Amino acid sequence: MQKTFRTKFIVLIHIFLFLFLIRNFAYGVDYNDDIQKVTLDYYYYEGFGKDKVVQRVKDGSWHILKPDGSVINLKGNYMDYAGIEKGKYYYFNEDYYRFVVANKDNSIRFVFVSKNGIECLVDGYSFADPTISDKYWLLMNVDSDMNYKFGLYDKYSKREVIPVIYDSLLYLDDDRIVVRNDEKEGIIDINQKLITPFEYNFLQYINDNFIIALDRNKHGVININNEVVLPFEYDEIHKVSETDDYCRIIKNNKFGLVNGDNAELVIPIEYESLYYVDEMCIGNNLILTQKDGKTGIIDVNNKEVVPFIYEGIELIGNYFEVYNDGLSGLLDSEGNEIFPTEFIDIMEVKDGFVTARVYIDDYEYKYAVYDMKGNEIVPPVYDYIDYHASEKYMIVKNNEGAAKLVEKATVEVVLTNNYYSDIIYINDKYFAGGNNSRYSIINFSGQHLTLPYYSNVYLVNVEGEEFLATQRHTSEKFKRRIDYFKQTEGPSQWAVEEVSKAIENNLVPFEYQVAFTFNIKRYEFCKIIVSFLEEYYDTSRDDIIMDNNIDVVNPPIVDGFNEDVAICLHLGIVSGRGKGIFDGESEITREEAAVMLTNLVKYLGMYEDAEGVYLNDKSELSSWSKDSVKFVMRNGIIHGVGNNMFSPKSNLTREQTYIIMYRMLHKMELKS
């Protein structure tokens, strides 16, 4: 009994596996990775965390979609989404979404929206921005001469707390607000009480005891009581740290560092340049300085960390790139040497790998990749390397500027016969290849799944399912169209059998054995007709051209020329739109296909008059297509769509076309 059950279970498993596999291996056809175009309710953009910024496709309205499915509706009439703005760059209290809106004079500006959907919009003002406070927004008005005035708005009490009269306004807290009035700056509080008089050309508030001030052409330091802490004799004083109150100070073209907490000079004014590296960047506080024409590194105690032996030092990631004699080397964050100055340039340091340009002779250089121990990971054979395109693949370029996708482990090129000036890695099934920033989606078998329409291709997760999202810019400024594609393999389930037979009968060229659900274009239809003629007559395209004396160099059309179109035009199977226009990029309609297929049958010498058919949508047929529609329906070449309808103006898909051509081939062979 137990043995019988085990046997039945094994048989069921085999049946299940067979049914699972037959989808993509039916009739000997192994389908490659493919896509199907889908229509989603929204255009999706990345947001904070698992949130999505979305734009409704139908009406263009904007929303924030939460992971639980709830939606925050935004009120603004936004032109476009501009991404996430880091608040620290604007003295905001947090990070915000940023949207593009149009001003009345057709110029553009940004509107900021919080992660909770609170929009910085106040009626009656040109625009409003966040501040470092959760309570206030910065109000702005701009007149016809582009003169700006600023004030402060309490977003909770919905009132103007500081009138919009100042030429600039920087809110720090209720007791410290730096404002400009009549080309002079001072400090007021939230009640507009004057704290520091309007005496200075510029103020940068550090703390109550250290306020950088510009009086005429010299910088000095005052405190909140307007007492001079450092005299007005310096060429520049400027805060250099986000976490500490260090300020760079310059006098007579010499640089030093002053502590903003106590106004003490921590680095004497004796260096020829000074660049402060914040602890946030590399884990400690270091200073790149120059003296006697050489660059080194010191700490905040003026202790030498790296000797002054380099021509230059720059921060690259969490490391230091050093220069000598026109070559580059690398130091770690503590100033220890990782690579001597032997590279032309260090392009990237990331995840424990260094991408560098190196000489391979006196004049020619290539890109190479090394680990932090100096081991060569990728030899200098490429003109460009993006080693971190993905965990598995890197993008390289050769002498001709052709971009290639290369597997890191085997150093094998994914596709060898295609030319792209640029590649965007998508996943291990697809990449985007293009020229002049116009990309098409390509699978790893080299089949183009789309035309090169798109300016960007990326993955988007919608309710747990990944889609390929492609951005196409429209003629309207700041308007983007996003097409979505579902990742799949092969044609629709109902079409697998006959599409497979069409492929096995050589009716579908390899490059057309994808994108089965896409509408077929007029020039693509010609390609399939020529494949049909090659199979039916057991001949080749070249022989068809030669036997019929077809001029493929000077065709009677001026757009979209190729040999397939020239053949079909010459044989009378297709015709143009008039005035030399073929319009090959347009998607073929069912009635256009009926005419072309009828002409094909006539060319084959097998046309017979057909009896009429009853159609509920007969009135929708064009006069030039009525006889052809009658013929293809009566002979079963193209079927109706149900309810005695032909739907003449709708389009044919690729898979429908392949099935039609297979049925025609079968019928023609039986007749002959």
Image (cartoon, rainbow, N blue to C red):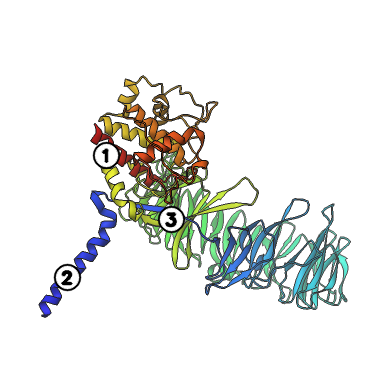
Residue 256 in sight = no
Residue 624 in sight = yes
Q: Mark 3 and mark 2: span between their CA atoms?
A: 38 Å
Reading the image, the residue beneath label 1 is 666
Mark 2 lies on a secondary structure that is helix
Is 596 situated above or below 17? above
Q: Nearer the viewer, residue 82 or 226?
A: 82
Q: Residue visible at 62% across and 55% down?
A: 292
Say which amino acid is labelled 3: Ile
User: Which quadrant of the figure contains the N terminus?
Assistant: bottom left
Q: Mark 1 and mark 2: span between their CA atoms?
A: 40 Å
Label 3, residues with CA under 10 Å away: few <14, some 14-19, many ≥20:
some
User: Which residue is situated farthest in the top direction here?
Assistant: 549
Q: Nearer the viewer, residue 455 or 179?
A: 455
Reading the image, the residue beneath label 3 is 426
Say which amino acid is labelled 1: His
User: Which quadrant of the figure contains the C terminus?
Assistant: top left
Q: Nearer the viewer, residue 561 or 332?
A: 561
User: Which residue is situated farthest in the bottom direction here?
Assistant: 1
Label 2, residues with CA under 10 Å away: few <14, some 14-19, many ≥20:
few
Mark 3 lies on a secondary structure that is loop
Q: Position of residue 632 (x, y in %)?
A: 38, 38
Q: Residue visible at 46% across and 36% down?
A: 626
Mark 1 lies on a secondary structure that is helix
Q: Which mark is first along the chain, 2 or 1?
A: 2
Say which amino acid is labelled 2: Ile
In the rendered structure, are the residues bearing label 3 and label 2 in contact, judged by CB atoms less than 8 Å apart? no
Q: Position of residue 16 (x, y in %)?
A: 24, 65
Q: Quadrant of residue 269?
A: bottom right
Reading the image, the residue beneath label 2 is 10
